[in-house]
Amino acid sequence: MSKYFDEMKEKFEALRLKKDVTILAIESSCDETAVSVVRNGREVLSNIVASQIDIHKKFGGVVPEVASRNHIMAISGCFKEALSEANLTEKDIDAIAVTYGAGLIGALLVGINFAKTIAYALNLPLIAVSHVHGHISANYLSHPSLTPPFVCLMVSGGHTALLEVKDYAKISEIGSTVDDSAGECFDKVARVLGLSYPGGPNIEKLACNGADVVKFNYHEPLKDTFNFSFSGLKTAVINYVHQKEQRGEEFNKADVASSFQELATETLSEKAVKCCLKMRQRKLVVAGGVGANSVLRDKLTKKCKKENIEVFFPNLKYCTDNAGMIGSMAYYYLKAGIGLADLTLTGKPNVPITL
Ligand code: KG4
Ligand code: ZN
């Protein structure tokens, strides 16, 4: 343990009791460099996101090394902008939060090293936050009165899972994907249809011009469980497209996009609602990038209304990666007395969801 850490333990304990806590949060796990200032876990004072989408588009996906280099170039500007947009100076910040995983290791390390440097220089506690937990917190920023307990349908790029959120920092997994995440499946199907990165939003756009009329050679697996499997669906769509191309047969890409989207969103929404009923939970919270999908939102809204379940979606700006959600979750880690990190903090490609 460093001298810095010993001092921070005391500061951290004092902060737990402080009335107003202002956290500056940093997120760099994938292709967005983001810095945000959040007060008391709920109030976003600034939310700066420097997206690298246009840079990675020409490669058809995120290139880890390119992402790290661009984080390095963007992070210091984002930090300054986050403070100035919040109308604050370094002196007004109570703690620094940073995403330590899951994500691309090189990309994570840029945010982590920047966060460690400013935490040490400003003599502030450093709070290490799980990116996946951050996605849940995006909902606290979007719905002021939302409180646990609830069931969470986690549909970020890297995770597809059903979670039981008993309290802000008491989270367990009910079921998860046994292979690909739904987001990966959207991205791979988009690629085979010749759509650019990021795939999910482009599938959604293309599907608007098509209809759910294509029958893939696919049967939904794991139907009676709360686990998901998306690799079979992905393969069925890819095989359909490749066969059509090899035989030189015409096919409608918009119909393929629509039919795929229908199947993917049906399994997600069906299981999420069944899970709430099984858990006797009347609140369902959606988290992560795929939660931006309007067909998924419509299906969940209708199914939840029918079962008398209240459903919550994050505002679109907090659905995909941002640092506001990390600043929010850091506040709840702090209140629960967890997450305080030493200067030895490093990035983790995977982190357990259970808290
Ligand atoms: O949560 P997120 O921003 O990043 C991770 O934590 O990984 O999620 C990114 C994923 C990508 O797979 C992207 O294609 C998907 O979310 N996505 C969508 C939509 N917007 C983003 N998928 C379907 N429909 C959308 N509108
Ligand atoms: Zn994410």
Image: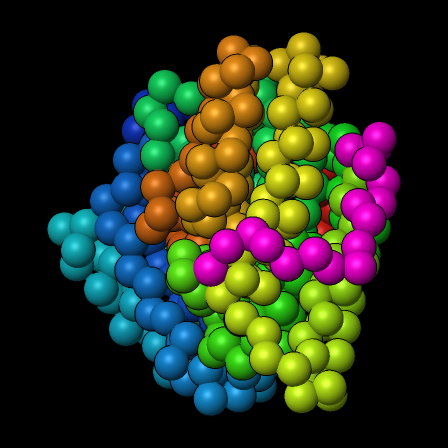
Which residue is farthest front? 249
* Position in image of residue 256 (x %, y %): 58, 64
Q: Residue at x 24, y 66 (%)?
A: 80
Quick check: 49 left or right of 183? left
Q: Relative to 45, does residue 195 appear above or below in the rendering?
A: below
Viewer-nearest residue: 89 or 191: 191
Q: Residue at x 29, y 60 (%)?
A: 48
* Position in image of residue 201 (x %, y %): 44, 61
The residues colored magenta run: 210-226
User: Residue 28: in sight, yes or no?
Assistant: no
Label total for image: 0
Viewer-nearest residue: 66 or 290: 290
Quadrant housing residue 266: top right
Q: Relative to 310, does residue 349 appear above or below in the rendering?
A: below
User: Residue 221: in sight, yes or no?
Assistant: yes
* Position in image of residue 208 (x %, y %): 41, 57
* Position in image of residue 288 (x %, y %): 52, 48
Viewer-nearest residue: 139 or 39: 139
Q: Residue at x 19, y 50 (%)?
A: 86
Examine the structure image and report whether residue 220 is included in the region drawn in magenta.
yes
Q: Residue at x 65, y 20 (%)?
A: 276
